[in-house]
Amino acid sequence: MKKIGFIGMGIMGLPMALNLVKKSGREIMGFDVVEEKRAIFVEHGGISVDNTMDIIKSCNVIFLCLPTNDLVKSTIKDIISFARSGTVIVDLSSTALNVVREMYYEAMKAGISLIDSPVSGGEAGAIEGTLAIMCGGDKEIFDEVESLLHCVGANVTYLGKTGCGAVAKLANNMIVGCNLASVGEAFAFAVKAGLDPEALFSAIKDGFAGSAVLSSKAPKLISGNYEASARVAVHQKDLKNAVQLAGEMGIEIPMSKMVLDYMNELEGDGRINEDHCAVAKIYEKRMSVKISKN
Protein backbone atom coordinates (compact mmCIF):
# COMPACT_ATOMS: atom_id res chain seq x y z
CA MET A 1 0.00 0.00 0.00
CA LYS A 2 1.36 3.39 -1.00
CA LYS A 3 2.32 5.79 1.78
CA ILE A 4 0.82 9.26 1.40
CA GLY A 5 2.27 12.61 2.44
CA PHE A 6 0.96 16.17 2.33
CA ILE A 7 3.24 19.23 2.30
CA GLY A 8 1.66 22.66 2.88
CA MET A 9 -1.34 22.79 5.20
CA GLY A 10 -2.48 26.40 4.99
CA ILE A 11 -5.95 27.84 4.33
CA MET A 12 -6.60 25.35 1.53
CA GLY A 13 -4.08 22.62 2.28
CA LEU A 14 -5.14 21.78 5.84
CA PRO A 15 -8.79 20.98 5.05
CA MET A 16 -7.71 19.00 1.99
CA ALA A 17 -5.25 17.01 4.09
CA LEU A 18 -7.95 16.41 6.71
CA ASN A 19 -10.34 15.12 4.05
CA LEU A 20 -7.66 12.70 2.89
CA VAL A 21 -7.35 11.44 6.48
CA LYS A 22 -11.12 11.17 6.82
CA LYS A 23 -12.04 9.62 3.47
CA SER A 24 -9.06 7.63 2.22
CA GLY A 25 -8.86 5.19 5.12
CA ARG A 26 -5.08 5.54 4.92
CA GLU A 27 -2.43 6.97 7.19
CA ILE A 28 -1.50 10.46 6.00
CA MET A 29 1.74 12.19 6.95
CA GLY A 30 1.61 15.99 6.94
CA PHE A 31 3.91 18.97 7.29
CA ASP A 32 3.44 22.71 7.54
CA VAL A 33 5.81 25.39 8.76
CA VAL A 34 3.12 26.56 11.21
CA GLU A 35 3.11 24.34 14.29
CA GLU A 36 -0.55 25.14 15.03
CA LYS A 37 -1.57 23.64 11.68
CA ARG A 38 0.34 20.46 12.43
CA ALA A 39 -1.37 20.22 15.82
CA ILE A 40 -4.82 20.48 14.23
CA PHE A 41 -3.80 17.81 11.72
CA VAL A 42 -2.84 15.44 14.53
CA GLU A 43 -6.09 16.14 16.41
CA HIS A 44 -8.00 14.84 13.40
CA GLY A 45 -5.97 11.67 12.95
CA GLY A 46 -3.06 12.78 10.79
CA ILE A 47 0.59 12.01 11.42
CA SER A 48 2.63 15.17 11.83
CA VAL A 49 6.31 15.36 10.93
CA ASP A 50 8.83 18.07 11.75
CA ASN A 51 10.26 18.53 8.25
CA THR A 52 9.49 17.80 4.63
CA MET A 53 12.33 15.29 4.32
CA ASP A 54 10.48 12.76 6.49
CA ILE A 55 7.69 12.76 3.91
CA ILE A 56 9.98 12.88 0.88
CA LYS A 57 12.00 9.86 1.97
CA SER A 58 9.11 7.66 3.09
CA CYS A 59 6.04 8.42 0.96
CA ASN A 60 5.12 7.10 -2.49
CA VAL A 61 2.47 9.76 -3.17
CA ILE A 62 3.23 13.33 -2.13
CA PHE A 63 0.62 16.09 -2.29
CA LEU A 64 1.81 19.70 -2.45
CA CYS A 65 -0.25 22.80 -1.65
CA LEU A 66 2.25 25.65 -1.55
CA PRO A 67 1.85 29.42 -2.03
CA THR A 68 4.64 30.34 -4.46
CA ASN A 69 6.24 29.03 -7.63
CA ASP A 70 9.67 29.14 -6.01
CA LEU A 71 8.54 27.03 -3.05
CA VAL A 72 6.88 24.48 -5.33
CA LYS A 73 10.02 24.27 -7.46
CA SER A 74 12.43 23.89 -4.54
CA THR A 75 10.25 21.23 -2.91
CA ILE A 76 9.97 19.23 -6.13
CA LYS A 77 13.75 19.47 -6.55
CA ASP A 78 14.14 18.00 -3.06
CA ILE A 79 11.76 15.19 -3.99
CA ILE A 80 13.74 14.51 -7.18
CA SER A 81 16.96 14.38 -5.17
CA PHE A 82 15.83 12.26 -2.23
CA ALA A 83 12.62 10.35 -3.01
CA ARG A 84 12.53 6.81 -4.32
CA SER A 85 11.90 6.05 -7.99
CA GLY A 86 8.19 5.59 -8.69
CA THR A 87 7.09 8.40 -6.38
CA VAL A 88 4.10 10.41 -7.61
CA ILE A 89 3.87 14.16 -6.92
CA VAL A 90 0.37 15.67 -6.97
CA ASP A 91 0.73 19.45 -7.12
CA LEU A 92 -2.49 21.05 -5.87
CA SER A 93 -0.87 24.51 -5.93
CA SER A 94 -1.51 27.15 -8.58
CA THR A 95 1.87 26.75 -10.23
CA ALA A 96 3.11 28.61 -13.32
CA LEU A 97 2.98 26.60 -16.54
CA ASN A 98 6.70 26.93 -17.23
CA VAL A 99 7.53 25.61 -13.74
CA VAL A 100 5.12 22.68 -14.13
CA ARG A 101 6.63 21.67 -17.46
CA GLU A 102 10.23 22.11 -16.31
CA MET A 103 9.68 20.08 -13.14
CA TYR A 104 7.74 17.36 -14.99
CA TYR A 105 10.70 16.63 -17.25
CA GLU A 106 13.24 16.89 -14.43
CA ALA A 107 11.19 14.49 -12.31
CA MET A 108 10.74 12.07 -15.20
CA LYS A 109 14.53 11.70 -15.50
CA ALA A 110 14.59 10.48 -11.89
CA GLY A 111 11.71 8.05 -12.39
CA ILE A 112 9.29 10.35 -10.55
CA SER A 113 5.89 11.42 -11.87
CA LEU A 114 4.20 14.81 -11.57
CA ILE A 115 0.50 15.57 -11.93
CA ASP A 116 -0.50 19.24 -11.96
CA SER A 117 -3.83 19.33 -10.11
CA PRO A 118 -4.77 22.89 -9.11
CA VAL A 119 -8.09 23.36 -7.35
CA SER A 120 -10.98 25.83 -7.28
CA GLY A 121 -13.73 26.33 -4.75
CA GLY A 122 -12.08 28.32 -1.97
CA GLU A 123 -11.76 27.47 1.69
CA ALA A 124 -15.40 26.40 1.93
CA GLY A 125 -14.95 23.93 -0.91
CA ALA A 126 -11.76 22.60 0.66
CA ILE A 127 -13.53 22.06 4.00
CA GLU A 128 -16.58 20.44 2.43
CA GLY A 129 -14.57 18.33 -0.02
CA THR A 130 -16.40 19.81 -3.00
CA LEU A 131 -13.48 21.38 -4.87
CA ALA A 132 -13.10 21.32 -8.63
CA ILE A 133 -9.73 19.75 -9.47
CA MET A 134 -8.12 20.32 -12.89
CA CYS A 135 -5.49 17.75 -13.79
CA GLY A 136 -2.72 17.47 -16.34
CA GLY A 137 -0.02 14.85 -16.83
CA ASP A 138 0.35 11.24 -17.86
CA LYS A 139 -3.08 9.57 -17.94
CA GLU A 140 -1.88 6.35 -16.34
CA ILE A 141 -0.47 8.29 -13.38
CA PHE A 142 -3.69 10.30 -13.06
CA ASP A 143 -5.59 7.00 -12.95
CA GLU A 144 -3.39 5.87 -10.03
CA VAL A 145 -4.25 8.87 -7.87
CA GLU A 146 -7.77 9.72 -9.05
CA SER A 147 -9.45 7.99 -6.11
CA LEU A 148 -7.34 10.05 -3.69
CA LEU A 149 -8.25 13.26 -5.53
CA HIS A 150 -11.92 12.39 -5.07
CA CYS A 151 -11.29 12.53 -1.31
CA VAL A 152 -10.70 16.27 -1.61
CA GLY A 153 -12.81 17.24 -4.62
CA ALA A 154 -16.26 16.52 -6.03
CA ASN A 155 -15.34 17.30 -9.65
CA VAL A 156 -12.02 15.78 -10.74
CA THR A 157 -11.26 16.32 -14.43
CA TYR A 158 -8.36 15.00 -16.51
CA LEU A 159 -7.64 17.65 -19.16
CA GLY A 160 -4.63 16.22 -20.99
CA LYS A 161 -0.86 16.41 -21.01
CA THR A 162 1.34 18.09 -18.43
CA GLY A 163 0.40 21.72 -17.86
CA CYS A 164 -3.24 21.40 -18.93
CA GLY A 165 -4.37 21.59 -15.32
CA ALA A 166 -2.25 24.69 -14.76
CA VAL A 167 -3.72 26.44 -17.81
CA ALA A 168 -7.26 25.53 -16.75
CA LYS A 169 -6.62 27.08 -13.34
CA LEU A 170 -5.38 30.29 -14.96
CA ALA A 171 -8.55 30.47 -17.04
CA ASN A 172 -10.61 29.76 -13.91
CA ASN A 173 -8.97 32.57 -11.97
CA MET A 174 -9.18 35.00 -14.87
CA ILE A 175 -12.96 34.50 -14.75
CA VAL A 176 -13.08 34.69 -10.95
CA GLY A 177 -10.91 37.82 -10.89
CA CYS A 178 -13.08 39.66 -13.39
CA ASN A 179 -16.18 38.55 -11.49
CA LEU A 180 -14.73 39.86 -8.23
CA ALA A 181 -13.99 43.20 -9.86
CA SER A 182 -17.45 43.49 -11.38
CA VAL A 183 -19.12 42.71 -8.04
CA GLY A 184 -16.96 45.29 -6.25
CA GLU A 185 -17.57 47.91 -8.93
CA ALA A 186 -21.33 47.32 -9.02
CA PHE A 187 -21.78 47.43 -5.25
CA ALA A 188 -19.66 50.57 -4.87
CA PHE A 189 -21.62 52.19 -7.72
CA ALA A 190 -24.98 51.22 -6.24
CA VAL A 191 -24.14 52.39 -2.71
CA LYS A 192 -22.83 55.67 -4.13
CA ALA A 193 -26.21 56.06 -5.85
CA GLY A 194 -28.01 55.54 -2.53
CA LEU A 195 -28.89 51.84 -2.49
CA ASP A 196 -28.65 49.63 0.57
CA PRO A 197 -26.04 46.93 -0.27
CA GLU A 198 -27.90 44.20 1.60
CA ALA A 199 -31.13 44.99 -0.23
CA LEU A 200 -29.23 45.00 -3.53
CA PHE A 201 -27.74 41.57 -2.81
CA SER A 202 -31.18 40.18 -1.95
CA ALA A 203 -32.61 41.62 -5.15
CA ILE A 204 -30.02 40.29 -7.60
CA LYS A 205 -28.53 37.12 -6.13
CA ASP A 206 -31.09 34.77 -7.71
CA GLY A 207 -31.19 36.57 -11.05
CA PHE A 208 -28.85 36.43 -14.04
CA ALA A 209 -26.15 38.28 -12.09
CA GLY A 210 -26.07 35.46 -9.56
CA SER A 211 -22.84 33.48 -9.26
CA ALA A 212 -20.75 31.57 -6.75
CA VAL A 213 -18.57 34.68 -6.44
CA LEU A 214 -21.54 36.96 -5.75
CA SER A 215 -23.05 34.53 -3.22
CA SER A 216 -19.83 34.02 -1.26
CA LYS A 217 -18.23 37.46 -1.53
CA ALA A 218 -21.08 40.02 -1.41
CA PRO A 219 -21.76 39.18 2.28
CA LYS A 220 -18.10 39.91 3.00
CA LEU A 221 -18.34 43.30 1.28
CA ILE A 222 -21.53 44.12 3.18
CA SER A 223 -20.05 43.14 6.56
CA GLY A 224 -16.62 44.62 5.83
CA ASN A 225 -15.01 41.31 6.76
CA TYR A 226 -11.99 40.78 4.55
CA GLU A 227 -10.51 37.87 6.50
CA ALA A 228 -9.07 35.65 3.80
CA SER A 229 -10.60 32.46 2.54
CA ALA A 230 -8.54 33.09 -0.61
CA ARG A 231 -5.74 35.66 -0.31
CA VAL A 232 -5.07 38.51 -2.70
CA ALA A 233 -1.45 37.31 -2.85
CA VAL A 234 -2.35 33.92 -4.31
CA HIS A 235 -4.81 35.31 -6.86
CA GLN A 236 -2.28 37.99 -7.80
CA LYS A 237 0.28 35.25 -8.48
CA ASP A 238 -2.15 33.43 -10.78
CA LEU A 239 -2.92 36.57 -12.77
CA LYS A 240 0.79 37.33 -13.09
CA ASN A 241 1.22 33.81 -14.48
CA ALA A 242 -1.68 34.38 -16.89
CA VAL A 243 -0.31 37.71 -18.13
CA GLN A 244 3.13 36.13 -18.60
CA LEU A 245 1.72 33.23 -20.60
CA ALA A 246 -0.41 35.58 -22.69
CA GLY A 247 2.72 37.58 -23.51
CA GLU A 248 4.54 34.42 -24.55
CA MET A 249 1.63 33.60 -26.88
CA GLY A 250 1.61 37.13 -28.29
CA ILE A 251 -1.91 37.97 -27.12
CA GLU A 252 -3.51 40.44 -24.72
CA ILE A 253 -5.87 39.75 -21.82
CA PRO A 254 -6.89 43.32 -20.90
CA MET A 255 -9.61 42.56 -18.36
CA SER A 256 -7.38 40.22 -16.37
CA LYS A 257 -4.50 42.71 -16.64
CA MET A 258 -6.75 45.40 -15.15
CA VAL A 259 -7.63 43.14 -12.20
CA LEU A 260 -3.95 42.34 -11.73
CA ASP A 261 -3.18 46.07 -11.62
CA TYR A 262 -5.81 46.46 -8.88
CA MET A 263 -4.28 43.59 -6.89
CA ASN A 264 -0.85 45.16 -7.26
CA GLU A 265 -2.38 48.36 -5.89
CA LEU A 266 -3.84 46.40 -2.96
CA GLU A 267 -0.33 45.10 -2.25
CA GLY A 268 0.89 48.69 -2.10
CA ASP A 269 -1.96 49.49 0.29
CA GLY A 270 -0.90 46.68 2.65
CA ARG A 271 -3.89 44.44 1.81
CA ILE A 272 -2.00 41.57 0.16
CA ASN A 273 -3.10 39.01 2.78
CA GLU A 274 -6.76 40.02 2.83
CA ASP A 275 -9.45 38.12 0.93
CA HIS A 276 -9.26 38.62 -2.83
CA CYS A 277 -12.68 40.32 -2.78
CA ALA A 278 -10.78 43.30 -1.30
CA VAL A 279 -10.56 44.38 -4.96
CA ALA A 280 -13.75 46.22 -4.00
CA LYS A 281 -11.61 48.54 -1.85
CA ILE A 282 -10.13 49.96 -5.06
CA TYR A 283 -13.59 50.99 -6.24
CA GLU A 284 -14.44 52.39 -2.80
CA LYS A 285 -11.32 54.53 -2.99
CA ARG A 286 -12.03 55.70 -6.55
CA MET A 287 -15.68 56.52 -5.81
CA SER A 288 -15.19 57.88 -2.27
CA VAL A 289 -17.77 55.47 -0.88
CA LYS A 290 -17.96 52.66 1.67
CA ILE A 291 -19.89 49.48 0.79
CA SER A 292 -19.91 48.01 4.29
CA LYS A 293 -22.83 48.82 6.57
CA ASN A 294 -20.53 48.49 9.62
Image (tube, rainbow, N blue to C red):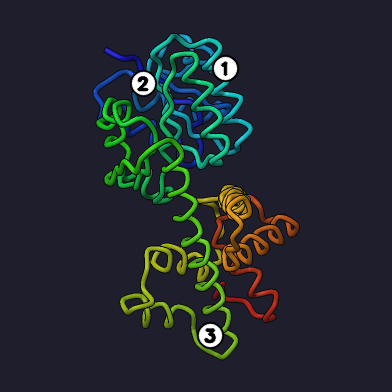
- Furthest residue to the front? 250
Label whose residue precedes the other's in the sequence (2 or 1): 2
Three-letter amino acid code of the residue under disc 2: Ile
Closer to viewer: mark 1 or mark 3: 1
Q: Are marks 1 and 3 in contact (CB under 8 Å)?
A: no
Label annotation for residue 190: 3
Mark 2: give few (<14), some (14-19) or many (20+) Cα within 10 Å: many
161 up-or-down from 4: above or below: below
Return the residue at label 2: 28
Instruction: State how far apart marks 1 and 3 are (Cα).
Output: 51 Å
* Quadrant including the N terminus: top left
161 up-or-down from 285: above or below: above
Label annotation for residue 78: 1
> Residue at left 54%, top 52%?
228
65 or 98, nearer to the observer: 98
> Residue at left 31%, top 31%?
139
- Name which quarter of the figure residue 40 lies in: top left
- Residue 164 position, x and y percent, is 42, 43
- Residue 108 position, x and y percent, is 46, 20
SS for tag 1? helix
SS for tag 2? strand
* Quadrant including the C terminus: bottom right
Three-letter amino acid code of the residue under disc 3: Ala
- Residue 279 position, x and y percent, is 60, 65
SS for tag 3? helix
Instruction: State how far apart marks 2 and 1 are (Cα).
Output: 20 Å
